[in-house]
Amino acid sequence: MKLVDTSSWIEYLRGHENDVARRVKELVRLDQAGWCDLIAVELWNGVRPGSEKKALKELEEAATSYALSSDVWRKARRLALRCRESGVTVPANDVVIAACAVNYGLEIEHYDRHFEKILPIAAKLA
C-alpha cells in the first residue's frame, strides 16, 4: 500500500501518459492506492468538471483512506519543527501528508519535489 500524494493523483486523473500516471494506475488496479482527507480536499479544490470529477467521485469510494488522527498531527508538528531546524521550508500540507505516511508505515507515491526534502527527515520520526 502507498499513500498517493495529490501531485500523483492529478497525473492519473488527468489521463497523462507518463511514469507517474502509470504507477498510480497500477496501484489503483492492485487496490494498493491510499490517501488521506487532506489529499482528497486538495484534489476537490482543483478538480475539473466532467470525467475528472466523475473519476474523483469513484476514487472516494475505492481508495483506502487513512485518518488524520491525533498521532498524525503530533508527528506533523514534530516533522515541521525538524524540517525548520534542518533549514527545509516546505508547504504545511506536504508535512502533514508525510506525517500520515510515517504514522501508518506507508511509502509515498509523489510527483512533488518537496517530498525529496521532507522524506529523509520524516524517516527519522518512525
Image (cartoon, rainbow, N blue to C red):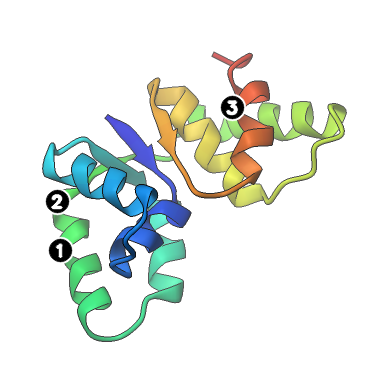
Q: Give me the residue at 68% from left, 23% from top.
A: 121
Callout 1–callout 2 Cβ contact below 8 Å: yes
The kind of residue on which mark 1 rests is Glu
- Tell me where residue 98 appears, x and y as whole percent: 54, 35
Label 3, residues with CA under 10 Å away: few <14, some 14-19, many ≥20: many
Q: Nearer the viewer, residue 80 or 1?
A: 1
The image quarter containing residue 50 is bottom left
Left or right, 116 with reference to 49: right
Residue displayed at 20% across by 79% down: 51
Which residue is the site of mark 1? 58
Q: Is residue 99 visible?
A: yes
33 over 124 or under it: above or below: below
Q: Is residue 55 left or right of residue 117?
A: left
Q: Residue tagged by mark 2?
A: 62
The 10 Å Cα crowd at callout 1, few under 14, some 14 to 19, many 20 or more, is: few
- Looking at the image, residue 112 sits to the left or right of residue 28; the answer is right
Mark 2 residue type? Ala
**Residue identifier under label 3:** 75
What percent of the width, then of the height, locates residue 88?
80, 37
